[in-house]
Image: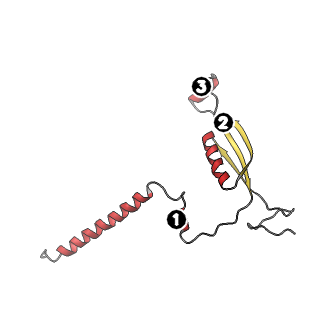
Amino acid sequence: MAAPNAAGSTSVTGQPALETAVREYRRTRDYERDMRERRQDGWRVVSVLQRPGPPAGVRRVVIGSGLAKPDTEYLVTYTRVPQPDPQLRPLQWLLDPRLVRRHSSRWIWSVAALLLVALLIYGFLDFFADAVPF
């Protein structure tokens, strides 16, 4: 029996079992961008199937008249050797670039400003509460 690899799975021959992912892209630009990112993560392109995409609306008439070509869709198969999960430090996930967005810091600052304004109003009300006779 073969010993498991770092990810815990092996094939019958003792080689590490490959991870496989199949993705479908509607645009060439999306395919090229994702392919570059996946290569950096250790993925390898096994096969690419190209097919014309379904035309919609006015584009169907333009394609039928021969003035334009249909968009190409891609069905891509990727493989890689399983990677062990990296040991992250506590709260390391907060630095993940997919988590950070352009408006996230604006949202945090607006909540902090609202809390400060509420604290200021409470302070004024508490300070002037003794000056108003009831």
Picture quadrant of residue 110: bottom left
Distance of label 3 from label 1 (alpha carbons): 48 Å
Task: Evaluate if marks 2 and 3 touch, with contact meaning CB atoms under 8 Å apart.
Answer: no
The residue positioned 22% from the left and 75% from the top of the image is: 126
Neighbour class for label 2 at 10 Å: few (<14), some, many (≥20)? some
Which residue, as the protein is rendered here, is positioned at the far bottom? 130
Is residue 16 left or right of 59 when viewed as pictured? right
Q: Which residue is mark 2?
A: 72
Mark sitting earlier along the chain (3/1): 3
Nearer the observer, 54 or 95: 95
Q: How far apart are the two marked residues, 2 and 1, measured between alpha carbons?
A: 37 Å
**Picture quarter containing residue 55?**
top right
Q: Residue at x 71, y 46 (%)?
A: 76
Question: Could you tell me which residue is drawn at 63 percent across and 70 percent down?
Answer: 87
Q: Which residue is mark 3?
A: 62
Examine the image and state in which quarter residue 51 appears.
Answer: top right
Q: How crowded is the residue under tag 1: few (<14 C-alpha within 10 Å), some, or many (20+)?
A: few
Q: Which residue is tagged 1?
A: 94
The answer to which of marks 2 and 3 sits earlier in the sequence is 3
Secondary structure state at the residue bearing disc 3: helix
